[in-house]
Image (cartoon, rainbow, N blue to C red):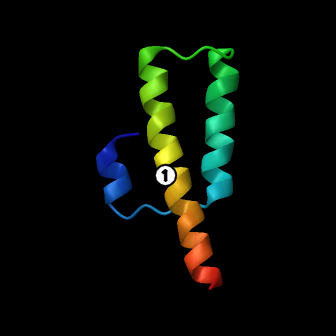
Amino acid sequence: MSPDSMASGSVRSAAEVNEQIRALWLRAGGSLSTQEREEYELLVVEWAAAIRGNVIEAA
């Protein structure tokens, strides 16, 4: 996933992103390569944004 795909307005739920994070860790066997670490960091940013969106919607 590229940063551009996040900026394009693609909105996934926190649960969807969390599932992708879990799958990444399972595929990696608990130790991330440099490329996997970059993917992980992007996913965490996306997950945090989804969580913030959920909080704002609930308010």
Residue 20 position by quadrant: top right
The percent position of residue 40, horizontal first and vertical second, equals: 51, 33
* Classed neighbour count for the residue bearing mark 1: other residues with Cα under 10 Å, few (<14), some (14–19), many (≥20): many
What residue occupies the far left of the structure in this picture? Answer: 4
Image quarter hosting the C terminus: bottom right
In the picture of the structure, the residue carrying the numbered disc 1 is 46
The residue that appears at 64% across and 52% down in the rendered structure is 16
The residue that appears at 43% across and 61% down in the rendered structure is 10
How many callouts does the rendering have? 1
The relative height of residue 43 versus residue 53 in the rendered view (above or below) is: above
The residue that appears at 70% across and 23% down in the rendered structure is 26
The residue that appears at 55% across and 62% down in the rendered structure is 50
> Label 1 sits on what residue type?
Glu
The percent position of residue 38, horizontal first and vertical second, equals: 42, 29
**Element class at badge 1:** helix
What residue occupies the far bottom of the structure in this picture? Answer: 59
The percent position of residue 34, horizontal first and vertical second, equals: 42, 16
Image quarter hosting the N terminus: top left
